[in-house]
Image: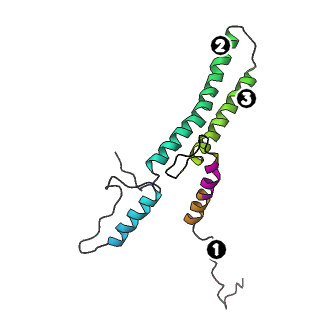
Amino acid sequence: MAERSKAMPFGPDKSGTANKSLPQKGSKSPQIKKAKATSSSQQAIPKPVANRMLRRVIFASGLPTAAGMGVFVASYLIVSRGIADISPFITLITSGACFLVGLIGLSYGVLSASWEDAPGSLLGLEHIGRNIGRMRDSRKANQPDSKSETKPKESGQTSDK
């Protein structure tokens, strides 16, 4: 199997073999190794936090997604047994709404998890604003400066054609 060409920027490199360039004989680079170790440990999601996120995502996304699939089954059973005549459009809209709630539940599950030692409340609504702020700060810190770098025009050059 081919190895990954690049380590993920947000996960720690635990394998020890993923895309490390070996230094030449006689050259030492301890500063680079220290920088990689610190940045990967700062960017890793702690296991208790990841478990909280997973539980919330399963609940907030899994249940609506299962309901979206259940709508198709229930609609088929109701129509095939002659209990009621359900329009395919109604089935499509209802299942689509369930899938949309499941999609929103993915974001909710990740953003409502507490990053502190204490797990927080059952719904985690108090952590959403704080986690969105952290996400924005992280994105701003990782973006390069957007100052436009324009070259000054050289004087003395004219375009005479």
The reply to whether the magenta stretch includes residue 86 is no
Res. 41 image quadrant:
bottom left
| 56 over 67 or under it: above or below | below
User: Which badge, 2 or 3, is on the more N-terminal residue?
Assistant: 2
Q: Residues within 10 Å of mark 2 (few under 14, many from 20)?
A: few
Residue contact at pointers 2 and 3, CB within 8 angstroms: no
Is 104 displayed left or right of 87 in the figure? left
Residue type at mark 1?
Answer: Lys
User: Which badge, 1 or 3, is on the more N-terminal residue?
Assistant: 3
Point 68% across, 8% down: residue: 81
C-alpha separation, residue under disc 2 versus residue under disc 3 = 17 Å
Q: Residues within 10 Å of mark 1 (few under 14, many from 20)?
A: few
| 155 over 76 or under it: above or below | below
Residue type at mark 3?
Answer: Ile
SS for callout 2: helix
* Disc 2 target residue: 77
Point 72% across, 9% down: residue: 83
SS for callout 3: helix
| 26 over 56 or under it: above or below | below
* Disc 1 target residue: 147
Residue 89 percent across, percent down from the top left? 75, 24
Q: Nearer the viewer, residue 95 or 127?
A: 127
State the extent of the magenta-drawn residues as a range.
126-133
SS for callout 1: loop
Residue type at mark 2?
Answer: Leu
Point 65% across, 21% down: residue: 72
* Disc 3 target residue: 93
